[in-house]
Image (cartoon, rainbow, N blue to C red):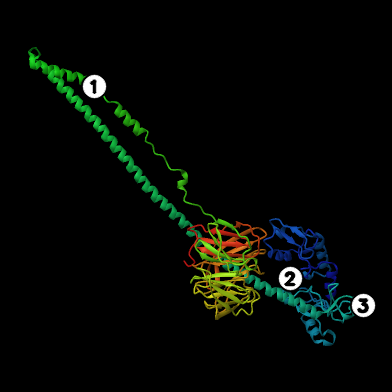
């Protein structure tokens, strides 16, 4: 049977994937052929692709909607397979009909198969074969039951050399990619790369084990990410529900205002109606008075005793007649009604513009550049002075510091020839600055008088300390190495020393006590949260080519500027500290700025204002009101 298996291999009718005789051979565009079922299993791992990459040559074969079923059948190979099975007496028939014993002439049903002998064996032959150890010791025998159940294959390659019958193929030629015996190596593979079979199979098994482990780990990562996606889906749902609630609230507010406006307008028209009615009633009343006067005069003038009119009675009659004449000649006041009608008909309702019906818009919030200020020298460090100003130090570029205000004014603060590498501001009106690698100075913010100078324990640092202060006026020093130091407000005592995972260039304290550390332009650029015992959470990592610069405000809101200097863009994201993690709250639209340095600084000036400084440029950024939630909601 070993010769038969070798013959199958020599006829190129073994599938490269399953290493068994082709079953329903299907062909890729490159000409390589595989079992249809093997290709279906291979394709199952790449259902997201519209093509198949050949496992042998990596050439791409386009797939239609039916995928593997649409690949052409290799009729030539299938014909060779049929001829092979016919020549072997129908080996594949073992899956349907039990083959007969070929080791004897009794033609009984086979119970087993010997790879070395190449014979099917009935129960009697199998018994003899197993006991004649002087002839058949070491032969590989498989039961037909295992073959039928699929746990064994008759077509697999024997361990015995087909040329040197009694030699085991316990070597592997890496050049020819075949197993061989020692004699074959000496004769035909002398200068080839040869490995021991066990070592080669151990390497393959190690690769398989490694792939299995990495595959399981990767699948677990995907499963975890799927869970994270569902969590994010719920957060997104909650956020959108909140947006919809805000829209409905704005609508109801507008609706109430519209209803109130309607009531006022209707009331105004009702008053107009009342005034018109009063004027019309007054006109009617005047006309009725005229009618009554005319009737009275006519009754007196038309008295039946006209021939007795003389002296006083005639005088009276003449007077009444004159009055009646006046009443009759008096024009009727039609203009008043016409004027009233004109005034009423020209009174119009003018609807408000359509824009007044706008409820608002759903969009990504955008920070506005309130003011851009040019500095004469590159910035080294900055700090907040007040709600409308910052203090800028220039390091080795220039002595002393400048006060830069939101309105754009720049004023020199000191004349003491002091270099400020980094600077911070304590709540007791004390300016703290780093002077060199181990020294910090304390100045009064009122008159810049020197109050003290301390040599701090910055012994592991390789640079002047980058400093900030906590809400308790503690001094936080990052030393551009592997430590963040926390000193008491006087700088005399080091209270904590936190080992960091990245090189810290900025360290900012929150009211909750955790420290926000950033490696800034050091690679990798990351922002990470530490507690005072040195525990940390997962970092916020910059994209390639970007650097991260954080700021913390008085409400423990963490703003992180992602700076892409080559592209001239920054994007600021708002985070909220949760334990040792930073939760993304809001991303603002990107800003296009002039970025003339890799060293930048971001500070919170007020609740609605940030200051971003890069090189010689200061940008005061205005946060849109009403859209940034408190750090703790």
Is residue 108 shown left or right of residue 289? right
Whether residue 539 can be seen here: no
Q: Specify the segment rendered in magenta.
A: 93-97
Is residue 85 shown left or right of residue 557? right
Question: In this rendering, which labeled residue sits more in front, label 3 or label 1?
Answer: 1
Q: Is mark 3 on a helix, strand or loop?
A: helix
Find out whether residue 94 is within the magenta segment.
yes
Question: In this rendering, which labeled residue sits more in front, label 2 or label 1?
Answer: 1
Which residue is at the front of the view, 174 or 606?
606
Which residue is at the front of the view, 549 or 13?
549
User: Of all residues shown, which one is farthest toward the top?
Assistant: 307
Location of residue 30 in the rendering, given as x and y in whole percent from the top left corner: 80, 60
Disc 1: which residue: 330
Location of residue 531 in the rendering, given as x and y in whole percent from the top left corner: 55, 76
Structural crowding at the residue carrying mark 2, measured as other residues with C-alpha within 10 Å and reported as few (<14), some (14–19) or many (≥20): some
Is residue 222 shown left or right of residue 554? right
Q: Residue at 46% of width from left, 54% of height from top?
A: 247
Disc 2: which residue: 95
The tag earlier along the polypeptide, 2 or 1, is 2
| Magenta part, dominant SS | helix
Reply above or below: 306 against 576. above
């Amino acid at each position: 049977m070993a010769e038969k298996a070798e013959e199958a291999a020599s006829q190129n009718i073994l599938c490269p994937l399953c290493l068994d005789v082709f079953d329903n051979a299907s062909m890729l565009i490159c000409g390589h052929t595989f079992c249809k079922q093997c290709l279906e299993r291979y394709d199952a791992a790449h259902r997201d692709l519209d093509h198949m990459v050949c496992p042998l040559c990596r050439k791409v074969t386009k797939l239609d909607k039916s995928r593997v079923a649409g690949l052409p059948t290799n009729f030539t190979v299938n014909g060779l397979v049929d001829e092979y099975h016919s020549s072997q007496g129908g080996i594949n028939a073992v899956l349907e009909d039990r083959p007969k014993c070929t080791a004897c002439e009794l033609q009984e049903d086979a119970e087993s198969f010997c790879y070395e002998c190449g014979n099917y064996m009935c129960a009697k032959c199998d018994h003899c074969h197993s006991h004649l150890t002087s002839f058949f010791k070491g032969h590989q025998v498989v039961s037909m039951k295992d073959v039928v159940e699929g746990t064994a294959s008759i077509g697999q390659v024997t361990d015995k050399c087909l040329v040197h019958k009694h030699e085991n193929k316990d070597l592997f030629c890496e050049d020819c990619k075949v197993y061989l015996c020692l004699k074959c190596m000496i004769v035909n593979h002398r200068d080839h790369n040869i490995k021991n079979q066990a070592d080669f199979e151990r390497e393959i098994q190690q690769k398989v084990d490694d792939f299995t482990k990495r595959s399981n780990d990767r699948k677990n990562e995907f499963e975890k990410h799927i869970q994270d996606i569902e969590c994010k889906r719920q957060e997104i749902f909650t956020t959108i529900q909140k947006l919809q609630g805000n829209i409905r609230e704005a609508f109801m507010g507008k609706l109430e205002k519209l209803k109130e406006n309607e009531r006022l307008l209707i009331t105004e028209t009702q008053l107009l109606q009342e005034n018109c009615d009063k004027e019309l009633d007054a006109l009617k009343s005047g006309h009725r008075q005229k009618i009554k006067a005319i009737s009275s005069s006519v009754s007196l003038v038309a008295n039946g005793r006209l021939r007795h009119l003389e002296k006083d009675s005639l005088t009276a009659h003449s007077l009444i007649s004159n009055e009646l004449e006046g009443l009759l000649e008096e024009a009727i006041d039609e203009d008043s009604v016409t004027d009233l009608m004109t005034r009423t008909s020209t009174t119009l309702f003018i609807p408000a513009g359509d824009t007044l019906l706008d409820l608002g818009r759903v969009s990504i919030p955008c920070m506005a550049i309130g003011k851009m200020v040019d500095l004469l020298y590159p910035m080294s460090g900055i700090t907040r002075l007040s709600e409308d100003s910052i203090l800028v130090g220039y390091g080795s570029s220039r002595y002393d510091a400048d006060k830069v205000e939101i309105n754009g004014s720049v004023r020199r603060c000191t004349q003491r020839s002091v270099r400020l590498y980094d600077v911070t501001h304590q709540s007791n009106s004390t300016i703290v600055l780093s002077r060199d690698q181990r020294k910090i100075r304390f100045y009064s913010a009122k008159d810049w008088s020197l109050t003290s100078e301390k040599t701090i324990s910055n012994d592991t640092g390789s640079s002047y300390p980058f400093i900030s202060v906590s809400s308790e006026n503690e001094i936080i020093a990052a030393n551009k190495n592997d430590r963040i130091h926390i000193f008491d407000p006087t700088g005399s005592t080091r209270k904590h020393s936190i080992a960091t995972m990245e090189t810290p260039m900025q360290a900012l304290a929150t009211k909750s006590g955790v420290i926000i550390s950033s490696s800034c332009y050091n690679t990798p650029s990351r922002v990470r949260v530490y507690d005072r015992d040195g525990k940390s959470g997962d970092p916020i990592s910059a994209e390639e080519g970007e650097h991260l610069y954080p700021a913390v405000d008085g409400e423990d809101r963490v703003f992180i500027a992602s700076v892409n200097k080559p592209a001239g863009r920054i994007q600021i994201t708002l985070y909220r500290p949760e334990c040792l993690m930073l939760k993304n709250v809001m991303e603002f639209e990107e800003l296009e700025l002039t970025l003339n340095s890799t060293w930048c600084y971001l500070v919170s000036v007020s609740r609605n204002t940030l200051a971003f400084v890069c090189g010689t440029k200061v940008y005061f950024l205005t946060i849109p009101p009403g859209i940034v939630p408190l750090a703790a909601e």
